[in-house]
Image (cartoon, helix red, strand yellow):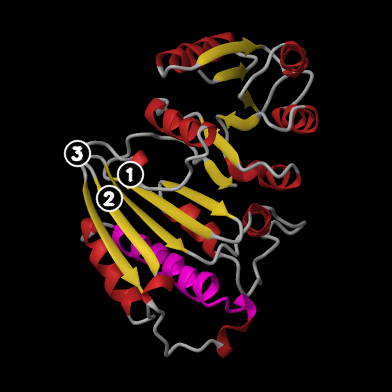
Amino acid sequence: MFKILVVDDEAPIRDMLSDALRIFGYDADTAPDGPSALLKLAHSPFDMILSDINMPHMTGFELLRKVEQSHPDVKRVLMTAYNLDDYMRMVRDHNVGNVITKTVPLNFKEIKEILNSLLNNAIFGLQQYMLEPHSLQTFKLVEPSQIDEISESLSEHYTGTPTHNKFKVVLIELMTNALFYGARNEAGDKKQEWVKDFRLADEEAVIVTACLDKEKLGVSVLDGGGKLDKHTVLYWLDRQTTHDENGLPMGIFDYHGRGFFITRKYVDRFIINIEKGKRCECCIFNYFEEKYAGNKPLIINEI
């Protein structure tokens, strides 16, 4: 049984989360702040620490940094009720990949799925995030001409709504990146030199998977290049969310690198799974109704 330490200065949140974790089948303990959490970690083994960001005595970022130094095998996840974009520079500086947001109501199923995938190192795959029953479609993307066709087909679920065009833009962005960066290893700052008349071998294909259940549509784009890493993703997100002295995004004039920011802005959930040197999977989810109001999480898993 996995053991998780919940750290939050608000007792009702602490108790609610720990009770939910026990229902999920985990062994859960709690601490009200960073120093108390470190004391418990020093005397008892834990598989994961789930910590709030804003706490007295020590922030969640500071706590996770100390846990990484003294207990490197412990999985580390942050939670916040605030807009994560306001923390993106700190997220990047502390190299944090997983920040769950406190939605209204709390999405306990999502929390369970995220924690379970991390604890079991089973980060890849779209279906673990879907309700039963669900339908499944798979496409093999081997040439650029397929991108528009696939994106239009999948975005038809939102025809007649503002979501249609936004979802299509995201799909085009993700498939283009996977095909040219992941599979072809093209340079992002040399798009004018890209060769666009090609066809990949079947074993090199980018795999696009779509799952539809009663509450959402999920799409994963998987390439076998494995050239992405967490640090790069955080760098580009920070460039678009951190502002200069004039109030403008630091990366407002960047020629490339905006795809992660656009995707995160336009979809309800965005998950990036990376096995360095082997494969990269971008998963996106859009709910058909505004079921979970609030800010969006940041989920970047790297093994």
Q: Is residue 97 left or right of residue 152?
A: right
Measuring from the top left, give residue 72's x and y in whole percent.
73, 33
Q: Residue at x 33, y 44 (%)?
A: 127
Q: Amino acid at mark 3?
A: Pro
Going by the numbered disc 1, the residue's amino acid type is: Gln
Residue 127's tag is: 1
Magenta span covers which residues?
Answer: 162-189
Is 31 displayed left or right of 199 in the figure? right
Asked whether 221 or 245 is in front, the reply is 221
- How far across and down, in percent of the image, does residue 288 sit? 26, 45
**Label 2 neighbour load within 10 Å: few <14, some 14-19, many 20+:** many
How far is mark 1 from mark 2, CA to CA? 7 Å
How far, Cα to Cα, is label 3 from label 1? 10 Å
> Disc 1, disc 2: CB below 8 Å?
yes
SS category of the residue bearing label 3: loop
Q: Is residue 218 above or below residue 81?
A: below
- Badge 3 vs badge 1, beta-carbon distance below 8 Å: no
Dominant secondary structure, magenta: helix
Determine crowd level at label 3: few under 14, some 14-19, many 20+ residues with C-alpha closer than 10 A: few
Q: CA–CA distance between discs 2 and 3? A: 10 Å
Mark 3 highlights which residue?
133
Which badge, 3 or 1, is on the more N-terminal residue? 1
Residue marked by disc 2: 211
Q: Which mark is residue 90?
A: none
Residue under the image location 66 percent in, 46 percent down: 88
